[in-house]
Amino acid sequence: MDTENKRVYGKWAGNTNGTPAVQGKCKESIRGDFWSFNQCTNNAKKDGYCLMHHPDKVKARRDKQDAKWEMEREISQRPYKKRLLYWETLTKIANGGINDPVGYAKMVLGASHEEVDRLLDDK
Ligand SMILES: [Zn+2]
């Protein structure tokens, strides 16, 4: 199928006809009712897409969402990392591996997220 000019919308299993693309409208397929797909009704502004569905805009939105998820994942790991660091610190102190246990414990308790990461990497 020539995906540029003969895109077929409203297509579902059993319907091989669908609806031909309306020229001048955005060529993105939008999910309609009952698993059918319809052509976006916005006017085509750039490369055959409306501004919302242009691949550059879609990618920018996806990248932004990915960055947000990555940040949330990073934040969700912090409590775990702190518990891990506290456990490692207690173990080091118990093994007599720390010359100034009071100072070391205070430093660990006051560590920023970046310092926690650095302390866990420094083994
Ligand atoms: Zn569109």
Image (cartoon, rainbow, N blue to C red):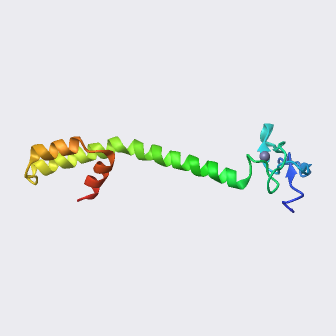
Above or below — where is 34 with respect to 93?
Answer: above
The quarter of the rendered structure image containing the C terminus is bottom left
On screen, residue 106 versus residue 79, left or right, reads left
68 with respect to 32 (left or right): left
Residue 80, quarter of the rendered image = top left
On screen, residue 77 versus residue 2, left or right, reads: left
Q: Position of residue 25 (x, y in %)?
A: 86, 48
Q: Report whether 75 appears left or right of 87.
A: right
Closest to the observer: 25 or 123?
25
Depth check: give the residue in front, 95 or 105.
105
x and y, in percent, of residue 72 in the image: 46, 43
Residue furthest toward the top? 33
Report the residue that reaches farthest toward the front: 45
Q: Say which quadrant the N terminus sits in.
A: bottom right
Q: Above or below — where is 33 with respect to 96?
A: above
* Residue at (42% x, 47% y) in the render: 74
Q: Position of residue 62 (x, y in %)?
A: 61, 50
Please report the residue visible at 79 percent of the width from the left and 39 percent of the height from the top: 32
* Residue at 25% over, 58% down: 122
- How many numbered discs, if any? 0
Where is residue 77? Give x, y as percent: 38, 45
- The residue shown at (52%, 49%) is 67
